[in-house]
Image: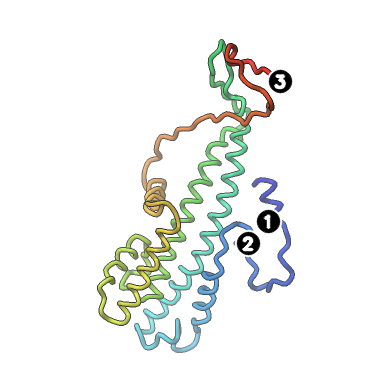
Amino acid sequence: MRASDLERLREPYDESTNVATRSPMAALGVEMPGWKQLESLILADLTEQFPFGIGWWAPHPGTKRRILISDQLYACTASVSVNMVEAGLHWLEFLDYTEREGARFADAVKIQDGYPVVDPPPCDSPLQDLGPSLVKIHAVGMIRALAGALDCLAGTIIGALALPKDILRADFTGVRIALQKTRNATTAGGKWQAEFENSLENHIRAAGPDGWLEWLLGFRNMLIHRGRRLEMGQYLPRNTVLSDLLISPGNPGLPVKTE
């Protein structure tokens, strides 16, 4: 991890903060106070005594099913935060390893006989050979964690909105499709689900460029279930450290100082 990120993560918590509510999520840039509140509310609804599970659901949908659904609902809700923390950690490690690889290849492009030639430095250890893999593993980890957070969010939606879907096999795309079917609902519960669907789709549209969600989930599926695609890279020029210098028209490779 980069020194600047480590320094930020080592900063002590505010002493005025309740010890029970302290979390690294803000320092990682994935703070979700509203979601953590929902997580606490669902946990508070669980009871180990009769009627078991989320007690106020009783007698529905039967004791065994109530226990199973209640447990999975809380597990999904808590796992959203877990996945987001993992995504934040993978992101910081990704930045660190990309910077290291960038520094190692910074002088790979040389001018020979007036032409640029790529001459990458040879690896002198297995660790250097693993540099590109370390970049990829954190990129893959970040995508996996973000998609995992969405699928766990789907489980929370199924349990909290009583959506007729299998909560044990929740997936975000399937939940969106199920919610779309509530748009013309006539029952009170169906109308509530339809209102949620409208709000959810608005949040998705506002969260990023068009198609970001489909890209994320499709990329996750490719990384996990398909062969890896050919990857391409490019060398970018460094920012110049020269000031008050121009390239001479007659000698494009020679800087000349201006008056």
Front-most of 36 and 194?
194
Residue drawn at x 44%, y 54% as measured from the top left: 208
Quarter-wise, where is residue 181 in the image? Answer: bottom left
Q: Residues within 10 Å of mark 2 (few under 14, many from 20)?
A: few
Q: CA distance from mark 3 to mark 1?
A: 48 Å
Q: Position of residue 20 (x, y in %)?
A: 65, 73
Q: Position of residue 228 (x, y in %)?
A: 40, 40
Q: Earlier in the sequence, mark 3 or mark 1?
A: 1
Mark 1: which amino acid?
Leu
Q: Residues within 10 Å of mark 3 (few under 14, many from 20)?
A: few
Residue drawn at x 59%, y 19% as measured from the top left: 110
Residue tagged 3:
259
The C terminus: image quadrant: top right
Front-most of 32 and 148?
32
Label 1–label 2 contact, CB within 8 A: yes
Q: CA distance from mark 1 to mark 2?
A: 8 Å
Front-most of 233 and 47?
233
Mark 3: which amino acid?
Glu
Label 2–label 3 contact, CB within 8 A: no
Q: Earlier in the sequence, mark 2 or mark 3?
A: 2
Q: Is residue 101 above or below residue 259?
A: below
What kind of element bears circle 1?
helix
Residue drawn at x 44%, y 35% as measured from the top left: 231
Q: Position of residue 172 (x, y in %)?
A: 37, 61
Q: CA distance from mark 2 to mark 3?
A: 54 Å
Residue tagged 1:
9
What kind of element bears circle 2?
loop
Judge depth for marks 2 and 3 and give the one in front: 3
Judge depth for marks 3 and 1 and give the one in front: 3
Mark 2: which amino acid?
Pro
The colour scheme used here is rainbow
Residue tagged 2:
24
